[in-house]
Amino acid sequence: MKGLVLKSTGSWYDVLGEDTHHYASRVRGKIRLEGIKETNPVAVGDHVSIEIQNGEGIITDILPRTNHMLRQSVKKTGHSHVLAANIDQALLVVTLSMPRTSLGFIDRFLVSAEAFRIPQLLVFNKSDLLDSEGLKTQQSLIELYSSIGVTCIATSALNDAQDTSLHLLENKITLVAGHSGVGKSTWINKLSPTINQKTSEISDYSEKGTHTTTFGEMFQLDEQTFIIDTPGVKEWGLVEMNEQELSDYFPEMREVRLDCKFGSKCLHINEPKCAVQEAVKSGTIALSRFESYLSMMANEDNRK
Ligand SMILES: Nc1nc2c(ncn2[C@@H]2O[C@H](COP(=O)(O)OP(=O)(O)OP(=O)(O)O)[C@@H](O)[C@H]2O)c(=O)[nH]1
Ligand SMILES: [Mg+2]
Ligand SMILES: [Zn+2]
């Protein structure tokens, strides 16, 4: 029987079978997806084949993935952890404070999704904590990211109803990610009265504290609508790509770079007559986005 992995703890999985029953499942032997070095062979969102034995599932096969999002492994062993697979859109919950989400982190997330052409959303949460200066900063970020095709929402998961958000999630599988403590679970709980996840104040917003959500889990909002809550992440593992490819995943660079003197060989770092660098100077491309690009280019860990 075919099934959908709703939850993964690393040793057992909650699989929703075609017959709409849930099966606590284990993996039989070693199954590996070719070409993916990952610590977890089966991820939330995977379509699998299961055999039922005494009411329990045994996962015998993983069907090919259309996409996946990688979290950098804790020990940076070169292996990554798959946060979720086969998603329709990737949503990052960000906060300007408590904790602060950096633009570099946001841009890495967007690039990771863009590499698979997965549409992206940003939820600016905890807006209730911002003063007028903070609200201005938030608004300018919303303008920046909207201009490059990212859907942006400003909200307070504590205070606001989430009708607009629900509409954006309809008939899709949405991955929800972000630093620990930004309010992912609080926000997801607000979407449906049937979802009641543990949430808690983290004592230390420098990200060293324990995470409240420890395993990725997919929830069904209606027949065709699924949402995946995930544990907080500190870093993204970019999928393998070459240097020329990176600017492909910055939508605002994609068109512009066709005018670079060195064409597809231009890396937009210090080449002469580079259309991307000119667009940064003239303000058409945001400096923060270009800085993220340079930082990703410089980080050998993420490009093999
Ligand atoms: N002021 C304010 N607090 C919020 C808001 N959303 C969530 N919180 C609080 O932030 C804390 C962390 O929320 P969680 O939902 O547990 O955060 P999380 O992102 O799921 O964290 P992990 O599971 O550790 O990744 C809780 O104390 C929430 O009540 C908000 O919009 N405004
Ligand atoms: Mg959580
Ligand atoms: Zn260039």
Image (cartoon, grey):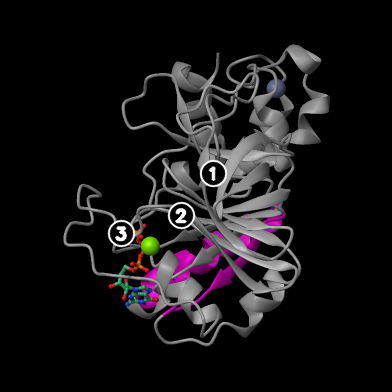
User: CB at mark 1 closer than 8 A to ligand 1?
Assistant: no
Q: In the image, what residue occupies the spot 52% across and 26% down?
A: 29
How packed is label 2: few (under 14 Cα within 10 Å), some, or many (20 or more)? many
Nearest the eye: 195 or 29? 29
Amino acid type of the residue tagged 2 in the rendering: Thr
Residue 212: image quadrant is bottom left
In percent of width and height, residue 159 lies at 42, 87
> What is the CA distance from the residue labelled 1 to the residue labelled 3?
17 Å
Q: Which residue is mark 2?
A: 230
- Amino acid type of the residue tagged 3 in the rendering: Pro
Check disc 1: other Cα within 10 Å, few if <14, some if 14-19, many if 20+. Answer: many
Ligand 1 lies under 8 Å from the Cβ of mark 2: yes
Magenta region: 130-157
Ligand 1 occupies quarter: bottom left
Mark 3 secondary-structure assignment: loop
Q: Which residue is mark 3?
A: 99
Residue 204: image tag: none
Q: Is residue 297 above or below residue 237?
A: above
Residue at left offset 70%, top offset 77%: 167
Residue lying at 16% horizontally and 62% vertically, measured from the top left: 203
